[in-house]
Amino acid sequence: MIVAVAVSSGFRQSVRDGVAAMVGDIRIQPQDRSAGEEYTFMARRLPSEAEILSVPGVRAIRPAVIRSGIVKDGDVIHGVLVKGVERPDSSLSVSIPERLARITGLGVGDNLTTYFIGDRVRVRKFRITAVHRDLVEMDDNLLVYANIEDLQRLNGWDRDQVSCLEVEAESRFRSRERLADVAAGVGFCLLESGTEEEEDLYVSPSTQAYPQVFDWLELLDFNVVTILILMTIVAGFNMISGLLILLLRNISTIGTLKTLGMENKAVGGVFVRVGAGVVLKGMLIGNALALLFCLVQGTTHLIPLDPANYFVSWVPVHIDLGWVLAADLLAFLAILAMLWLPARYVSKIDPAVTVKAE
């Protein structure tokens, strides 16, 4: 059960982080895209920036310049999406995804020749300083991270002109409903400012860019809930069977206790406490094994996945102690409640019959 919760949480975190890296949790951009994305710009600083940062769930606002390009290395030609962000590396340095590294055979220290098509072809020779993991491989857009100043110079823009602004949301606001609420709050701030420049901007959450991803996550959460319910029921029936065996093996003891005046509820409570001790011991062992598995998988990525089907290339795990404790507590209470069913068998035991049989 803990592994199921950890894997579900890991998928949510990894996929949402991957989507946020590509398009941001919420994107503010010009509405007019008729001239092409790379030729449409907006102001880097908005008059309503302070109001947007005060919207519940908003963590930061980051500028970005986006430009499509073509990478060529020998006979290998592939389209890429170059995203200019604020990076600590030097000028003309880039970070490429693992997929692009595999396709081109390039690595850290190599040069990446990129062609940008526009009114005329521009060529830039970037130097690869990092290779990042493809957390989300949902399409053919290979995202290359470059310095924002390099792409501004490429487009002939000044430092105050960018393609879009990406709003980073707090992790607990990255669900479909909450992102929509945050996006609505950001849009209201733009309209409330009253400036013509901001009224022409368009606000869109990442759920609109990749709705199929969030649909898949919701289906995954539903499956996990179903698995947890089934596991709890199976564990409960296993404990019921174990407690019945324990009761049958101690019929004479039950008869003796009832002969001495012990009530049915008290006798049943003894066996429920014994069963609860077995449950706690099993849960401690299960917690230890689950945490060990999550530690190994989280550090080694031992179990791979097909990113074409699962969006990520390995099984992601994320331990949320709150969810672990909640799963432990709910499972323990549910199994403990089910243990009272066989404990009621005590009331049907006749002391006279058991003592006579003995």
Image (cartoon, helix red, strand yellow):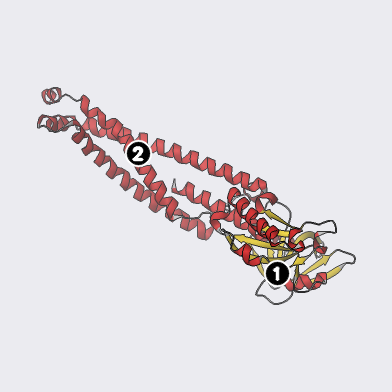
Q: Where is residue 261 in the image (x, y as percent from the top left)?
A: 11, 32
Q: Mark 2 points at which residue?
A: 335
Q: Give left or right: position of 34 versus 258.
A: right
Q: Which of 146 and 307 is in front in this view?
A: 146
Q: Give left or right: position of 354 versus 117.
A: left
The image quadrant where one finds the C terminus is top left
Q: Where is residue 299 in the image (x, y as percent from the top left)?
A: 51, 60
Q: Name the residue under label 1.
A: 45
Q: Quadrant of residue 112?
A: bottom right
| Label 1 Cα crowd, 10 Å radius (few <14 / some 14-19 / many 20+) | some
Point out which mark residue 67 bears.
none
Which residue corresponds to the image point at 85% horizontal and 69% vertical from the top-left? 122
The image quadrant where one finds the N terminus is top left
Which residue corresponds to the image point at 9% horizontal and 32% vertical from the top-left? 260
| Mark 2: secondary structure | helix
Q: Which of 166 and 143 is in front in this view?
A: 166
Q: Where is residue 204 in the image (x, y as percent from the top left)?
A: 69, 54
Tell me the amino acid under the disc marked 1: Arg
Which residue corresponds to the image point at 51% horizontal and 54% vertical from the top-left? 317
Of tags 2 and 1, the one toward the viewer is 1
- Disc 2 or 1, which lies upstream in sequence? 1
| Mark 1: secondary structure | loop
Q: How far, Cα to Cα, is label 2 from label 1?
A: 57 Å
Tell me the amino acid under the disc marked 2: Ile
